[in-house]
Image (tube, rainbow, N blue to C red):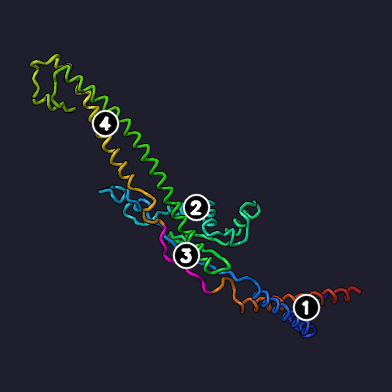
Amino acid sequence: MNKPTFDLVEIIKIIQRNLKMILGITFLATAIGAIGYNLKDKEYEAKAEAYMLNPLFGDRNHILRRATADIRFVDYFGTEGDVDKAMALIASKNVEDSVISVCDLYKIYQLDPTKAKDRAAISERYRNNFEAKRTENASIMCSYTDTDPERSAKVLDHIVKITDYQFRQYLFTVKTNAEIKINKKISEIDLQINHYTDSLIAMRNLYKIYDIISPNRQNMIVNSMSANGKVNPAEGVEKIQNIESIKDQMVISRAELVATAHELNTTNLDEMSLLHYVSAPSVPNKPSGIGFVLTVFACAFAAFFFSVLLFSFTAYIKALADTER
């Protein structure tokens, strides 16, 4: 018993026999696609591209340095690692919550922030509408889609600006904490310097030695001190020199710490931005996705193809049943 086979000629015959039905299905699907396209809310996608400034160059702390041996200062743009940190931050929950609050998206999307279900819904909607990726030029390309073209550009602009602010806030917090630790250390050194100063005063009055004794013993080499009228001058010189050398070193260390603290103190949240636009968000003129013509054509093609497939399959099953009988 031979099973029925179909070739192109047979398929064309099937189309001819069911042409009215196929055209009717195609027309109906086309009309449904056209109506659905017009009834569906249009979505507008705003796009922006930003590059990362080198954080080492971007704050006054390092701009005020007179010289540096760090080769990273040669590059004004952020490194791959800096871009990775910016990518992690721009997709973070902190930025998401800040943008939702600043742009009042709960009210716009008619959701209640006190309900866990609505909080999950707006978070999912935000993450579905927002996209960020890094380019081969180490810049960040991001987009936000919304039914309102102006809102899509506004939200995207806030995303970039809030990411930049939180990045600078993180750096500011780190340097502020460092300044606090340094100032604490300076206070500790001041107490020690005062202690050594009191000790030196007492020893100089005791041994009657008022010369400035350098730690490298230059005073003794030139023999500028006299033992006349002094009590045990050899012992006094050694003790005074030991304490004076420690005090001098601590004074030097304190000066370095004070200079570093002053540099850190110049940093604030008004530093120059780390994220700069290559192309700023603009209000999109056309909705995203395929247009009306492509939508109608896709619906018509899909309806025609599947209807032909359906009638061909039906004819094959019928022919197969007749053959078996």
Q: Residue at x 85, y 76 (%)?
A: 318
Q: Which residue is mark 2?
A: 88
Q: Which of the labelled discs sits on residue 250, or is there none?
A: 4
Amino acid type assigned to the residue bearing label 4 in the image? Met
- Please say if 51 is above or below 253: below
Looking at the rendered image, the disc whose residue lies closer to the viewer, 2 or 4, is 4
Residue in view at x 26 percent, y 28 percent: 193
- Percent from the top left, x then y, of residue 301? 68, 78
Tag 2, which secondary structure?
helix
Give the CA separation, mark 4 to mark 1: 98 Å
Q: Earlier in the sequence, mark 4 or mark 1?
A: 1
Disc 3 marks which residue? 48
Identify residue for label 1.
6
Vertical placement of residue 194 versus 299, above or below: above
Magenta segment includes 128: no
Q: Quadrant of the N terminus?
A: bottom right
Quadrant in which residue 136 is drawn? bottom left
Give the residues in magenta: 275-285
Circle 1 residues within 10 Å: few <14, some 14–19, many ≥20:
few
Q: Quadrant of the C terminus?
A: bottom right
State how far apart marks 3 and 1 are (Cα).
Answer: 54 Å
Q: Amino acid at mark 1?
A: Phe
Residue 97 horizontal side relative to residue 175, left or right? right
Residue 215 in picture, x, y percent from top left: 19, 27
Q: Of label 2 and label 3, which has the lower sequence position?
A: 3
